[in-house]
Image (cartoon, rainbow, N blue to C red):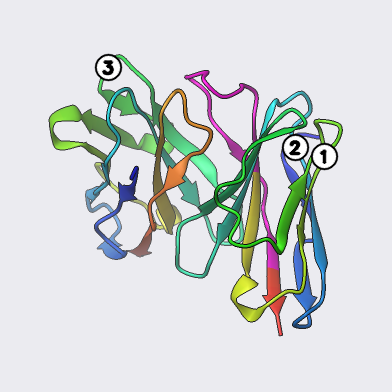
Amino acid sequence: GAGVSQSPRYKVAKRGQDVALRCDPISGHVSLFWYQQALGQGPEFLTYFQNEAQLDKSGLPSDRFFAERPEGSVSTLKIQRTQQEDSAVYLCASSPAGVGHSNTEAFFGQGTRLTVV
Amino acid sequence: AQSVSQHNHHVILSEAASLELGCNYSYGGTVNLFWYVQYPGQHLQLLLKYFSGDPLVKGIKGFEAEFIKSKFSFNLRKPSVQWSDTAEYFCAGTTSSASKIIFGSGTRLSIRP
């Protein structure tokens, strides 16, 4: 597609429920990022993939958060046993270059708004 | 720790006023800096980026930013704003060896018609 696509756009989950958020990056993009954006805040880094390898997961807030990109394309962010503090917009971004390459930018999807009730 | 700071949380201007949004970063070494914009209901879009070379960077829609290394700043400017510039603006930065782009907390810009 023309851009980064995320689904669903909106998700309401009951506390304790597991959720899975999908990201389709721009075709051929090597790098994929997940960010969490709370209301009124800037995006906070969660994790980074270069192709299928998860090179940085330092931003994942707890072991309830898990991300994968098994074939180096589509990625899924899974949140287990959701809590109210998980309510946020989850942004996916992709980039054509890998780590260490300058002169690159990240292209963002529209995000998934997760509301935990 | 690496960080990006935006000084203004909410800026309100009248149309045709000049704009300057502050951004400071704490990186050492070679930095890559960005300004992203998020219009209501839309995704983050790149306004402009700085990697090297001319410290005055021109972006889309008449925006520009100046990289001042001695001040660790990358302020965004526009000489004359329009109502359609109403949006959230994010400054962000990384280094060439980093695996993540770090964002500031954002500045909400409201333009009075």
Residue at the extreme top of the image, as rendered: B53
Q: Which chain is disc 2 placed on?
A: A
Residue at the extreme right of the image, as rendered: A71
Left or right? Give the position of A11 relative to A46: right
Q: Say the numbered circle drawn on residue B78.
A: none
Q: Quadrant of the N terminus of chain B?
A: top left
Question: In percent of the image, x 48 and y 19: which residue is there?
Answer: A103
In the rendered image, the vertical position of residue B46 relative to residue A114, given as above or below: above
Question: In percent of the image, x 18 and y 30: which residue is there?
Answer: B68
Residue at the extreme left of the image, as rendered: B70
In the rendered image, the vertical position of residue B108 relative to residue B25, given as above or below: below
Quadrant position of residue A80: bottom right
Q: Position of residue B33 (x, y in %)?
A: 37, 33
Left or right? Give the position of B18 relative to B47: left
Asked if labels 3 and 1 touch by Cβ distance under 8 angstroms, the answer is no
What's under tag 3, amino acid-wise?
Asp
Q: Position of residue B5 (x, y in %)?
A: 29, 51
Q: Residues within 10 Å of mark 1 (few under 14, many from 20)?
A: some
In the rendered image, the vertical position of residue A78 relative to residue B51, given as above or below: below
The reply to whether the magenta stretch includes residue A46 is no
Q: Quadrant of the C terminus of chain B?
A: bottom left
Q: Position of residue A101 (x, y in %)?
A: 52, 18
Q: CA distance from mark 3 to mark 2?
A: 31 Å
- Circle 3: element type: loop
- Foreground: A56 or B53? A56
- Circle 1: element type: loop
Q: Which chain is disc 1 placed on?
A: A
Magenta residues (range): A93-113
- Foreground: A2 or B79? A2
- Residue corresponding to mark 2: A25
Asked if labels 2 and 1 touch by Cβ distance under 8 angstroms, the answer is yes
